Amino acid sequence: MNKTTLYRRWGTKEALMLDAIRERAVTNVPIPDTGALRDDLLALVRAAIGNLLTPEVQAMVRAGISLAPYENSVAAMVDSCWTERLAVDGGDRRTRRSASR
C-alpha cells in the first residue's frame, strides 16, 4: 500500500495507530457481561493481558513509546479509545438490562 493512501485515510501516524489499537481491542478484548461486576472485571483484565502479550500489540506499544516524546497526543488518543469504548459498551449494556427488567 502506498504511503499517500495511508495518509489520505488516517492523516497521521497517531491516527493509524489508534485505529489499529481500537480494532485490535474490539476484536480481542470484548467487554464482558456476565452479570457480576467482579467476573466482568476479571474477564476484561485477563483478555487485556492476553492481548498485550501478543507480538502485534507489543509492536504497537513500542511504536507508541517511540512516538510519545514527540507526540503528546498519543497517550490522549489511547485513553480516549478505552474511554469511548467502555462508555459506549457500558451504556448499551445498562440500557439492555433496564429494558429487560
Image: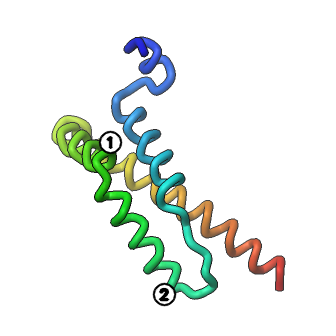
Q: Residue at x 56, y 72 (%)?
A: 32
Label 2 neighbourhood size at 10 Å, few (<14), some (14-19), many (20+)?
A: few
Residue 16 location in percent, x, y?
A: 41, 33
Residue 29 location in percent, x, y?
A: 48, 61
Residue found farthest to the right: 100
Q: In the picture, which quadrant includes the C terminus?
A: bottom right
- 62 horizontally vs 92: left or right: left
> Looking at numbered disc 1 in the image, what kind of residue is underneath it?
Ser
> Looking at numbered disc 2 in the image, what kind of residue is underneath it?
Arg
Residue 43 location in percent, x, y?
A: 47, 75
- Vertical placement of residue 1 versus 47, above or below: above
- Vertical placement of residue 34 versus 67, above or below: below
Q: What residue sits right under mark 2 in the picture?
A: 38
Q: Which of 62 and 76 is in front in this view?
A: 62
Which numbered mark, 1 or 2, is in the foreground of this view? Answer: 2
- 65 horizontally vs 29: left or right: left
Tell me the CA gap for discs 1 and 2: 32 Å
Residue 69 location in percent, x, y?
A: 16, 41
| Secondary element at image label 2 | helix
Q: Which of marks 1 and 2 is nearer the N terminus?
A: 2
**1 and 2 marks in contact (CB < 8 Å):** no
Label 1 neighbourhood size at 10 Å, few (<14), some (14-19), many (20+)?
A: some
Q: Which residue is drawn at 43% across and 67% down?
A: 47
Label at residue 73: 1
- Vertical placement of residue 58 versus 2, above or below: below
